[in-house]
Image (spheres, rainbow, N blue to C red):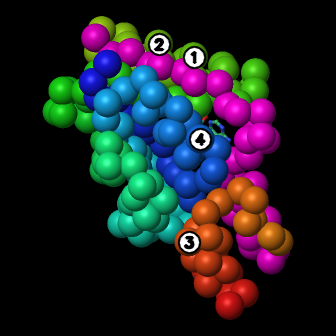
């Protein structure tokens, strides 16, 4: 298949997300990582910085692009003519929310498909929320994120 997009908050991008992107590149020729901005949440990193962080983390993959949207994912799909979204599944607990979202998106836009990739067992318990919490307390997040993200987290929380 040609082109898919990977929507999410990516606040910040973790090695779990990167694993999904790397594996999705075996299935799709091009992936757009889409930072979906939630107007009700204040992210740790502003959207432009999040995009820059993702570009840096994915720079070895020429087939990866980064974009953002403040609107609905289905509207992004229609506007850009990309009707396949990728999502990652970590545990059964992810399933219900993902199921609802996939069905809702498809009921709004019948050509819209969501492709799910199972997490690698190394990243099963890894989430951006946990990374933020560990970094906030000055813990070591080197196993979970790239060195660039680790540095930015340390700066953000005043550890360097
Ligand atoms: P959300 O949209 O819930 O804020 P994120 O932005 O963190 O989620 O993640 C975007 C997508 O990446 C979601 O489908 C999420 O399940 C998936 N994901 C996040 N962390 C991992 C991981 N460690 N392994 C596999 N998939 C993951």
Quadrant for ligand 1 reads top right
- For marks 1 and 4, give the CA distance: 21 Å
Q: Mark 3 falls on what kind of element?
A: helix
Secondary structure type for disc 1: helix
Q: Position of residue 127 (x, y in %)?
A: 69, 47
Please rate how many residues cluster around mark 1, counting C-alpha atoms within 10 Å: few if below 14, some from 14 to 19, many from 20. Answer: few
Residue 103 - label? 2
Can you identify the residue that label 3 sits on? Answer: 148
Residue position for label 4? 19
In the image, what residue occupies the spot 52% across and 51% down? 10
Q: Residue 3: which quarter of the image?
A: top left
Task: Kindly identify the residue that appears in the image at 43 percent across and 64 percent down.
Answer: 56
Classify 71 as above or below 58: above
Vertical side of 92 occupied by 122: above or below: below
Q: Is the shortest distance between ligand 1 and the CB of mark 4 under 8 Å?
A: yes
Instruction: Specify few, some or many for label 3: CA neighbours under 10 Å numbering under 14, 14-19, or 20 or more.
Output: few
Q: Nearer the viewer, residue 35 or 5?
A: 5
Q: Tell me if 129 is positioned left or right of 121 in this view.
A: left
> Mark 2 and 3 residues: CB-CB less than 8 Å, in contact?
no
Q: Which residues are magenta?
A: 111-138
- 144 or 46: which is nearer to us? 144
Label 1 sits on residue: 99
Query: How far separated are the C-alphas under marks 1 and 2?
Result: 6 Å
First in sequence, mark 4 or 3: give its number.
Answer: 4
* Other-residue count near label 4 (Cα within 10 Å), few / some / many at <14 / 14–19 / ≥20: some
């Amino acid at each position: 298949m040609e082109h898919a997009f990977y929507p999410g908050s990516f606040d910040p991008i973790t090695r779990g997300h990167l694993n999904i992107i790397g594996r999705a590149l075996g299935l799709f020729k091009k992936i757009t990582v889409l930072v979906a901005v939630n107007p009700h949440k204040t992210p740790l990193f502003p959207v432009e910085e999040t995009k820059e962080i993702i570009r840096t983390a994915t720079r070895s993959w020429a087939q990866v692009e980064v974009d953002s949207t403040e609107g609905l994912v289905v509207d992004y799909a229609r506007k850009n003519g990309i009707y396949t979204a990728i999502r990652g599944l970590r545990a059964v607990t992810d399933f219900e929310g993902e199921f609802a979202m996939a069905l809702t998106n498809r009921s709004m836009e019948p050509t819209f498909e969501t492709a799910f990739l199972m997490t690698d067992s190394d990243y099963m318990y890894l989430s951006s929320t946990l990374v933020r919490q560990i970094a906030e307390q000055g813990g070591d997040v080197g196993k979970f994120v790239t060195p660039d993200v680790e540095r930015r987290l340390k700066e953000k929380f005043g550890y360097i």
